[in-house]
Image (cartoon, helix red, strand yellow):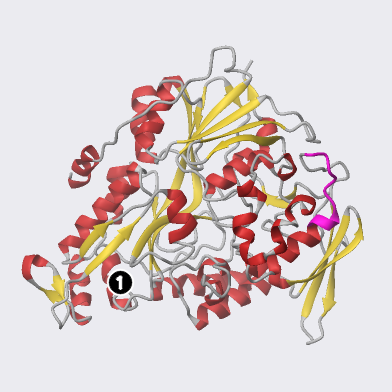
Amino acid sequence: MWIKRLLFSALAAAFLLPAPSQAQERRQITIGISQFPSTFHPSIDAMMAKSYILGLTRRPLTVYDADWTLICMLCVELPTLENGQAVLTELEDGRQGVALTYRLLPEAVWGDGTPITSADAVFTWEVGRHPQSGVSNAELYRRITEVEVVDDKTFILHVDRLTFAYNAINDFNLLPAHVEREAFADPAAYRQRSLYDADPTNPALSAGPYRITEMRHGSHVVLERNPHWWGEQAAFERIIVRAIENTQALEANLLSGQVDMIAGESGLPIDQVLAFEQRHGQRFQIHYQPNLSYEHVDFNLSDPILSQLPVRQALLYALDREALVQQLFQGRQQVAHGTVHPLDWVHAEDVPVYEYDARRAGELLDEAGFRPGPGGIRRDAEGRPLSLTFMSTGGNRTRELVQQVLQAQWRQIGVDVRINNEPPRVLFGETLTRRRFPHMVMFAWISSPENVPRTTLHSESIPSEENGWAGQNYGGYANEEMDRLIGEIEVELDREARREKWRRLQHLYAETLPALPLFFRSDAHIMPLWLEGVRPTGHQYPATLWVEEWRVRS
């Protein structure tokens, strides 16, 4: 019941935005999301709100579809060893590499009509491999030793190793060299000078069914049909994406008709949708999609308190996560015991589990030198209180509620936790990427099938000023065995041998606890009754990548 009491105390005021006119409602659709992107650059900062919007304006070379199958979107066919478009190579040091031939769609052009060519692939590689560019997946670009141009529409990527996912270059986000090259003249300033933020309505940045024609930072993005789109014409002339970070206000905007639908990928938390469905379910289509999303608490492992494994273990033992998911989410979200979702084929069933055990949590804190003190708060030998700052995305009602639940449970074992939230664009754009959170931060990693966690767990992916704040290992986790396992998994082609290495990785994660696993999320998509063709994917690539399949129901 204590969770329910917190639920009713965590209410926020709603605000309304102007509604579309009746004449517009079938020529346009207005989508509500709960976050506004920190940047529109496709390779800088990982944020689902950005991926959702860019899914309307861009097409990646390769991507996983709604059936979790790797497909080409901007290329003609996937290069494979079987079709001869992937060829094994021998490197100077005796290791085995691979040469991958990609042929761009002949009709593919940027939004200003300029053909998408191999020159864009070369420029993208130059940006990605530069140590000061600040791209999130810098490791991908480091592994590509050369981009060989065959012709305007064909290029060969020379990669320094053969991995099991050798032809999945999903993060090789093509950039329009003809307009972005000038911004890259000073690589250290590229993040600030890129047209994706300096001039986001520039049509040359688009390569999809829509292009951005208006953007008000923190508020909304207006997208209109791209006249140079080569594929099937999308049903809507105009799409408006409104970012409303307060989820109560987002719901109010849906009910009042200010938005037509709420994206499951970056929308309302599932507990809010469950309550919404009871009251208004007959007015909307509501689809629950299990997702490879891992809600967790990241630690700043540079902190002398959180660098101690017994303290991290105590913080996890203190949490009754099963009660949390049952009472808040009616069991629709699953307790996580690691980073790999049970739906993923590499999930290990025998991962060590930290069941709720407040007594054991107290014993671990005793062993770490934190004894109960005045007011029930534990203190170290010098009398300093065990006090930790806890951050997350401000305005997300469920995250704020979960924070309060965790705060209360940690208080029961004598840990003083102070909540200090920030708007998502600040948290993801600055605080996380520059590792400025003092102790703990709660957010979700959104993954794809069998996604090797190099950018989040490898020691080379710790963001720093020296590497241009590249990488997503925000906690600063460094473990030699984890680094080795990540490297071995990537190059292991035998599925059963790879499964065993994945099993050891999951055990190591549980043994070292670089973060606190909370639960695997399910996305709740709320759509109007008149819309059809939306296919949620259940992974990090959003349904907007197939927006041309969306239709108004007859």
Residue 115 covered by magenta stretch: yes
In this rendered view, identify the residue nearer to me: 97 or 22: 22
- Residue at 74% over, 75% down: 161
Element under label 1? Answer: helix
Q: Residue furthest top?
A: 23
Can you see residue 69?
no
Relative placement, left or right, of 405 versus 251 is left
- Residue at 21% over, 41% down: 4
Instruction: Work out which quarter of the rendered image holds the C terminus and state it.
Output: top right
- For label 1, the residue is 313
Residue 283 covered by magenta stretch: no
**Relative height, residue 58 to residue 280 (above, below):** below
Name the quadrant containing residue 188.
bottom right
Q: Residue furthest bottom?
A: 93
**Relative height, residue 153 to residue 463 (above, below):** above
Across and down, in percent, residue 330 comes to 33, 41
Which amino acid, by three-letter code, is at mark 1?
A: Gln
